[in-house]
Image (cartoon, rainbow, N blue to C red):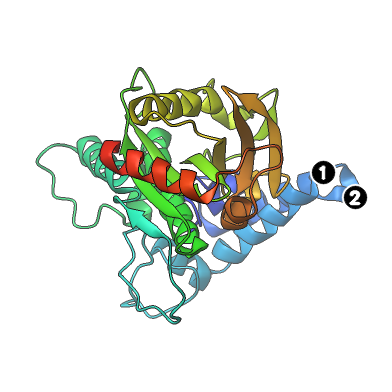
Amino acid sequence: MPESPLSASPYEVLGVASDADAAELRLAYRRALRTAHPDTGGDAVRFHAVQAAWALVGTPEARAAFDRGIRTVAPSDAPHQTWAPPAPRPRRDSRPLARSYGHPGGLTRELYLDRIREWVGRGVEVPDPYDPELVRRAPRDIRHILADALAEEATARALSTLGIAYTVWHDVATDAAGPGLPPKLDHLVLGPTGLFAIQSEDWGGPVSLKRNELVGESLAGERPIRALAARAKAIGRAARVKPTALVVVVPDEYAAEPLQVGGHVRGATVALVRSSRVASAVREGLPGAPQIGGTEVMEVRSRLQATVRFA
């Protein structure tokens, strides 16, 4: 199963329909491998993607397992892997966690469930809205919503490890909603290294930071930093505080660098961060971003606690 709802399926990587017969699939694999091979002018990343796709569907057993929604060969009654919300797990350590409020990814998952059921058809029963085969067939905009929910949840798990010196609010409502602009900020983090407005995204493709805005083919005209700045400004105005950092978090494979820091927008430092790097980026602070003293942290926290509403 693809790690992200936006990941190309093995069939898409090989350029065949999901119901292609074995001979057609093998022919497509050989053609794709020849085209992608670095020795013939191809791309190494594409070459490895073709090999990975073949590993998933290249044998009848592996293909049957993939089509059932699992990665490896398993009995036919094996449970499907799914993008459903994970069950709570007991903690394995006693280290204090950051104070956290709100429901990360909650509103986005609600939107996904509404859209996937609308796409399937009103009145049609959907036993498992996270079934991998159903998700793979859904339009890209619906898969994008689910991918964003997963990204939000991953960031929330990372931020929870910051420790008791930090306070995190998730799914914060703002009045900055507009066309194409969700009415929330994914994460707001306060600690001695600053006040971070953070948005978690998965566009299914690489992005980079250029002139204080994200660029990339997968963005389809979006201006994420501009939208994030509008949300942060709305929250800051309501609470009479000033965010010190505007951060967009993406899956590791979609950012060329672990941390890319830009300039300033409305006094806040702009950054693009890999998902695996977000906690350390917040804990260490962004280069050029102002930090907040102990007494000021308490004052800002009080203002935010009295102001923050959840989406």
Is the C-beta separation of discs 2 and 1 under 8 Å? yes
- Report crowding for label 1: few under 14, some 14 to 19, many 20 or more residues within 10 A (C-alpha): some
Q: What element carries label 2?
A: helix
User: Front-most of 235 and 55?
Assistant: 235
Left or right? Give the position of 136 relative to 26: left
- Report crowding for label 2: few under 14, some 14 to 19, many 20 or more residues within 10 A (C-alpha): few
User: Front-most of 108 and 232?
Assistant: 232
Residue 260 drawn at (x, y percent): 70, 40
- Image: 179 above or below 1: above
The C terminus sits in image quarter: top left
- Image: 136 above or below 231: below
The amino acid beneath tag 1 is: Gly
The CA distance from mark 2 to mark 1 is 7 Å
Tell me which residue sits at (56%, 22%) in the image: 266
Q: Is residue 100 visible?
A: yes
The image quadrant that residue 305 belongs to is top left
Left or right? Give the position of 50 relative to 86: right
Q: Which residue lies furthest to the left in this view?
A: 123
Q: Disc 1 marks which residue? A: 42
Residue 310 drawn at (x, y percent): 26, 40
Tell me which residue sits at (44%, 63%) in the image: 164
